[in-house]
């Protein structure tokens, strides 16, 4: 039984359960206090002590030589690609549904003159190793082809539902890159989620990578920014590109202070976020010991389809089955009227993302509202006359 019933909030919203993304979290009191008291200086000149602390801590955590704070994950990925692909007309091999390819405004091409060579992403976010190797250009054809310089992976893979790339797979891609004289960049926007879910230390998980971008404002809940890590030479070039792209900021210690709190306090909460996602998704029937999943989860709601077995981290994708009487837009509106915010992916797909400011009670309330949406809106397969 669901503990808390769904109810309509007319005119005045009394409760908000924001499941649109893990980017919607608000700074905690500890973060606000750290921001208010942060020691700062001019970071463009290289003197902000709190930025230095964050970058030093991130480099150590990720097992790399150096790190650089950047305003966003999009800028972090763009800078990383441009450092590795320093000649216009270079080519990067990446997944066809990865974030860099789909959601970053084509920046590597429009700004950097870098050509994206797409390889099909599998359902688990990987690309077949043999397909990656087949996509590497033959240097003998340099008169006609772009020059392959870089391979990009994404971990966790957002468009695959937050699936994790294993350390074994990442190592194999790294070995392939070295074999062909290429670099490997990991878009690690939610790399801490992957580390926790896999039970692998984050530095080991990215050991094969030449560079990694890590989002501070997604899974771990800082208000702003990302960090890129790599060799000292890589970061020196990245710092210059950050200035070129308008990302050099002055007293950024006020932002880095909040990120330090997030690293200290919120990485340990990620497993709880993953459990809440599994609770919402429901029972994975192929898992024998599945005590953390709910028998009343979304995958038990007729008319909705959730692959509970694919929920590895904090994301749940919800599909509306063919032949139903409603669309995602109507369900999202119904949920919003009850204080629950859900991301519409398409006319037949929705996404929810769990984070540290969503409680188990919030999950049960959201589940109750989804169930009620089915009953009220008739999200059922049409049975004919």
Image (cartoon, helix red, strand yellow):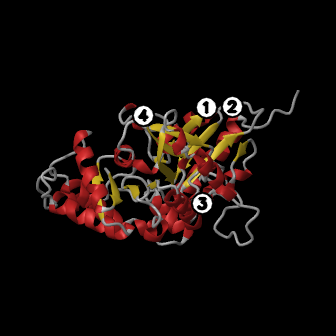
Residue 378 appears at what percent x and percent y? 73, 35
For the residues labelled 1 and 2, the Cα–Cα distance comes to: 7 Å
Q: CA distance from mark 3 to mark 1?
A: 28 Å
Check the picture and name the quadrant holding the C terminus.
top right
Rendered location of residue 372, percent (x, y): 66, 43
Residue at image mark 4: 109
Q: CA gap, disc 4 to disc 2?
A: 39 Å
Residue at the disc numbered 1: 330
The residue that disc 2 covers is 326
- In the drawing, does residue 250 fall left or right of residue 308? left
Could you say whether the residue bearing mark 4 is in a helix, strand or loop? helix
> Mark 1 or 4 closer to N-term?
4
Please give the name of the residue rendered at 51% of the width and 72% of the height, measured from the top-left corner: 200
Q: Which residue sits at x=39%, y=65%?
A: 266
**Res. 312 mark:** 3
Query: In the picture shown, does residue 213 fall above or below 275?
Result: above
Mark 3 lies on a secondary structure that is loop
């Amino acid at each position: 039984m669901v503990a808390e019933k769904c109810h309509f909030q007319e005119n005045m919203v009394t409760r908000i359960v924001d499941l649109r993304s893990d980017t919607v979290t608000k700074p905690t009191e500890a973060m606000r206090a750290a921001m208010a008291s942060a020691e700062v200086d001019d970071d463009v000149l290289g003197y902000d002590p709190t930025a230095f602390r964050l970058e030093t801590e991130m480099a150590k955590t990720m097992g790399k030589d150096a790190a650089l704070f950047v305003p966003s994950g999009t800028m972090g990925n763009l800078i990383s690609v441009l450092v590795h692909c320093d000649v216009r007309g270079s080519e990067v091999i990446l997944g066809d549904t990865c974030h860099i390819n789909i959601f970053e405004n084509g920046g590597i091409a429009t700004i950097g003159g870098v050509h994206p060579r797409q390889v099909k992403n599998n359902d688990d976010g990987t690309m077949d190793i043999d397909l990656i190797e087949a996509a590497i250009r033959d240097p003998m054809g340099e008169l006609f082809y772009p020059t392959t310089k870089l391979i990009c992976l994404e971990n966790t893979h957002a468009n695959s539902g937050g699936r994790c790339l294993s350390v074994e797979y990442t190592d194999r891609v790294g070995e392939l890159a070295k074999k062909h004289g290429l670099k490997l960049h990991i878009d690690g926007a939610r790399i801490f989620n992957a580390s926790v879910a896999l039970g692998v230390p984050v530095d080991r998980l990215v050991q094969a990578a030449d560079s990694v971008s890590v989002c501070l404002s997604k899974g771990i809940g800082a208000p702003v920014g990302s960090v890129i890590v790599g060799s000292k030479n890589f970061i020196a070039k990245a710092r210059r590109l950050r200035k070129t792209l308008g990302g050099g900021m002055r007293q950024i210690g006020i932002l880095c202070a909040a990120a330090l709190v997030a690293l200290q306090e919120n990485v340990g909460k990620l497993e709880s976020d993953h459990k809440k996602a599994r609770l919402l998704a429901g029972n994975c029937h192929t898992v024998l010991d599945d005590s953390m999943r709910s028998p009343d989860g979304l995958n038990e709601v007729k008319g909705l389809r959730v692959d509970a077995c694919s929920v590895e981290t904090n994301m749940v994708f919800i599909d509306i089955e063919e032949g139903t009487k409603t669309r995602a837009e109507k369900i999202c509106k119904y949920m919003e009227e009850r204080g629950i915010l859900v991301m519409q992916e398409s006319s037949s797909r929705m996404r929810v993302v769990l984070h540290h400011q969503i409680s188990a009670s919030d999950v049960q309330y959201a589940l109750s509202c989804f169930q009620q949406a089915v009953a009220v809106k008739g999200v059922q397969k049409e049975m004919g006359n």
